Amino acid sequence: MPKAFPRGRICWDELMTTDPKAATAFYKAIVGWGTQESGGGSSYVMWTAGGTPVGGLMALPDEARMMGTPPSWVMYVAVPDVDASLRQAVSLGARAYVQPQSIPTMGRFAVLGDPQGATFALFSSTTGVPGHDGPSKPGEFSWHELAATDWRAAWDFYEHLFGWVKMDAMDMGPAGTYQMFGRAGKMLGAMYDKPPEMTGPPNWLCYALVPNADSAATVVQRLGGKVMNGPMDIPGGRIAQCMDAQGATFALHSHAPQAEAAPKPKRRAEKAVKTLAKQPARKEAKAARKGEKAAKKAAKKAMKAAKKAAKKARKAIKKAAKKERKAAKKARRKAAPRGR
C-alpha cells in the first residue's frame, strides 16, 4: 500500500542572495552546514546536514533585483500537484510570483505571495518529498513563523491550502495571540499579528536548529550579520532572530540542555534517601548525648562543691565545739573554791 502524500510538509528552505559565495561561508560557520552541487551545469547549491540536503542557495535573479526584491529565505511546502494548488491559492487571494516550473529529475515548483503579501513556495517531487515528520535534527529547520497583518485571515488561507491544524496557542497580552500549527502530530510553526513597530510586509521567518543559539549569534555578529532580537528563552530552548551580511533575515533555535539522568543503581538511590531521612534523628541523638554529658558533668561538679561545703561546715562546727569546751573549762576553774 503506497504511503500517503505528506501534503503540507515544510520540506525545503531556500536562500536567494546577492552574494552566494559570501553567504556560503557565513552559514557554514554559523549553522555548520555542508554544501552539495546540484549538478547538470546548474549554479544551484544545496545545504546539507549530516550529508542530507535540507535546503538550497541561489543568486537572486536579475528580474527580482530589478523589482527591488531583497535577499531572503523562502520556505517550500509539499503539495501533490503544484499547478492545481497554485490555482487554488489564487482563488483564495494569493498572487503568483513565479509560475509553475519543472526541475529535471526533481519535481515542480511555483513561488507566490499569500493574500497579505508573505512569500512562500509550492513543491511537488518526482522522486520523494524531502524532509521528515519526526523531531528536527541539528542543521535542519525546526520552526517557521508568520508575522501577518491578520493572522486569523492568514490561518484560513493556509488551512484550506495545506490542511494544517491548529495546535497550542499562547496569549501574549497586548501583542495578541501566538497561534501554533502543525501536521501529522508535529508542530511546524506559528502565526501572529506583527506589531506596528515591525516594518515591512508580512513575512515568514525560518529557524535553523543549532547546538547553542547564544554561541551561534555571537558568530553572526563577528561575521558581519546582525542580531535583531535575542538571544532569549522560549519554552524548551533559546532563540535569536538575525540578519545576514546581505540583508536576509533568519533565526536560530537551540533546545534546552537535557537534565542529567538519575544514577542507575536503585540501591544507591535508596541508600541516599535513607541517609537523608536518618540525618535529623542522628542530629537529635547527638544533641541528646551532648546534653546528657553536660548534665553529668554539672552534677559531678555540684556534688564536689557540696562535699567541700560539708567538710568546711564540719570543720567549723568542730572548731566551735572545741572553743566552747575550752571556755566552759575555764569558767569551771574560776568558779571552784580556792581554800582547800
Image (cartoon, helix red, strand yellow):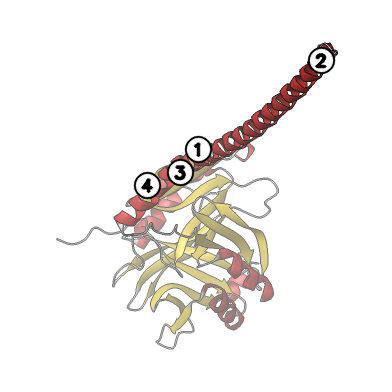
Identified by mark 3, the residue type is Arg
Q: Is residue 250 visible?
A: no
- Distance, label 4 to label 1, CA atoms, is 21 Å
Q: Earlier in the sequence, mark 4 or mark 1?
A: 4
Along the line of sight, which residue is nearer the eye, 65 or 212?
Answer: 212
The residue that mark 2 highlights is: 331
- Which residue occupies the extreme front position in the image? 340
Q: Earlier in the sequence, mark 1 or mark 3?
A: 3
| x, y percent for residue 125 | 32, 69
Along the line of sight, which residue is nearer the eye, 67 or 56?
Answer: 56
Identified by mark 4, the residue type is Lys
Question: In the image, is residue 236 above or below residue 209?
Answer: above
Q: Which mark is residue 274?
A: 4
Front of the two marks 2 and 1: 2
Identified by mark 1, the residue type is Ala
The residue that mark 3 highlights is: 282
Horizontal placement of 186 versus 190: left or right?
left
Question: In the image, is residue 264 above or below residue 55?
Answer: above
- Distance, label 4 to label 3, CA atoms, is 12 Å
- Distance, label 3 to label 2, CA atoms, is 73 Å
Tell me the SS state at disc 2: helix
State the image quarter where residue 245 is shown: bottom right
Tell me the SS state at disc 3: helix
Q: Quadrant of the C terminus?
A: top right
Q: Is residue 36 visible?
A: yes
| x, y percent for residue 325 | 74, 20
Q: Residue at x 46, y 64 (%)?
A: 141
Identified by mark 2, the residue type is Ala
Question: In the image, is residue 84 above or below residue 153?
Answer: below
The residue that mark 1 highlights is: 288
Front of the two marks 3 and 2: 2
Horizontal placement of 174 versus 206: left or right?
right
